[in-house]
Image (cartoon, helix red, strand yellow):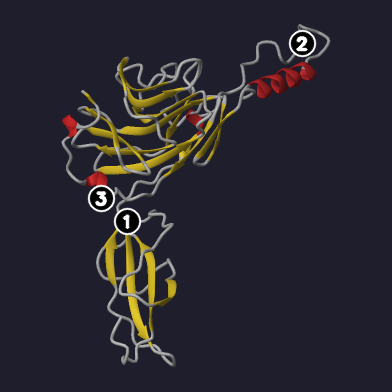
Amino acid sequence: MPDEDSKIDHYVLEYRRTNFEGPPRLKEDQPWMVIEGVRRMEYTLTGLKFDMKYMNFRVKACNKAVAGEFSEPVTLETSAFMFHLDASTSHQNLRVDDLSVEWDAMGGKVQDIKAREKDGKGRTASPVNSPARGTPSPKRMPSGRGGRDRFTAESYTVLGDTLIDAGEHYWEVRYDPDSKAFGVGVAYRSLGRFEPLGKTAASWCLHLNNWLQVSFTAKHANKVKVLDAPAPDCLGVHCDFHQGLLSFYNARTKQLLHTFKAKFTQPLLPAFTVWCGSFQVTTGLQVPSSVRCPQKRGRGPTSLT
């Protein structure tokens, strides 16, 4: 702020989301959001969802009576990864609600019972003339993986709905520590419907097992690396597609837990698995500076090629 004898009492900051680079346009669909009473020369916006590529900012000074003119607006790039969970890929025992997932032991069974009851009520006394005879089974839910069926058997998995084919991206996931099993990572779209994360070359993940014997491991292509660090309740995932790096962090401390080094040959999808538990994903996050900084990847806690 200026000196105490200055007539400036506070500032007003305004910002709006946009998909246009460069100077703000006269006609914008997005309204200006207002931050009143700023009394410092810096201000941090929190809780933002970066669902557009850019943001406009402008500021004006005010005294106790009137406000001055707005500054020339500036446009800043807000490159961050936004995705949702694709319920059409999820195992029937997973109840998906946008970015939250909860294990449902009765998932699929209730639908099957209702379908059988409806089928039984629709039958006639004559088996020859029954319209149910020879009718095809109900259509399966459409999948976001090119018509493939959803995950099944012991692959309690759900995928994100947005492909990663370039750049750096970061997201976080908080899981219920009482979950019997939990996994987070990435996968190719071609991941088989029976394939648990990390079992084949089509996926990479960190996996926590709380069932019978506790273990915290990194998995890829059926290779398992036991991790020395305790499993945090919130994990950060950093994917650098062109560098072929997939790193996992303690989201609170930004401690590096594990890094996969790979040559990604196909676009990736965020992937999650949970058994007898729940988790919640946070997207739209900028890559933290502590994560973006160069690290001696090979000398980190663990690495697996």
Pointer 3 or 1: first along the chain: 1
At 31% from the left edge and 91% from the top edge, which residue is drawn? 6
Q: Quadrant of residue 201?
A: top left
At 49% from the left edge and 41% from the top edge, which residue is drawn? 99
Which residue is tagged 2?
129
Pointer 1 or 2: first along the chain: 1
Mark 1 vs mark 2: give the one in front. Answer: 1
Secondary structure under badge 3? helix
113 shown above or below 63: above
Amino acid under disc 2: Asn
Q: Quadrant of residue 92?
A: top right
Amino acid under disc 1: Lys
- The spot of residue 61 in percent (x, y) is 35, 84
Q: Residue 8 has which mark? A: none
Which residue is tagged 1?
53
Secondary structure under badge 2? loop
Amino acid under disc 3: Ser
Work out whether residue 17 or residue 119 is closer to the camera in this orientation and state it: 17
**What whole-number distance in Å separates the C-alpha atoms at marks 1 and 2?**
60 Å
**What whole-number distance in Å separates the C-alpha atoms at marks 3 and 1?**
19 Å
Which residue is tagged 3?
289
The C terminus lies in which quarter of the figure? top left
Work out whether residue 211 or residue 168 is closer to the camera in this orientation and state it: 211
At 30% from the left edge and 80% from the top edge, which residue is drawn? 1
- The spot of residue 193 in percent (x, y) is 44, 19
Pointer 1 with pointer 2, Cβ within 8 A: no
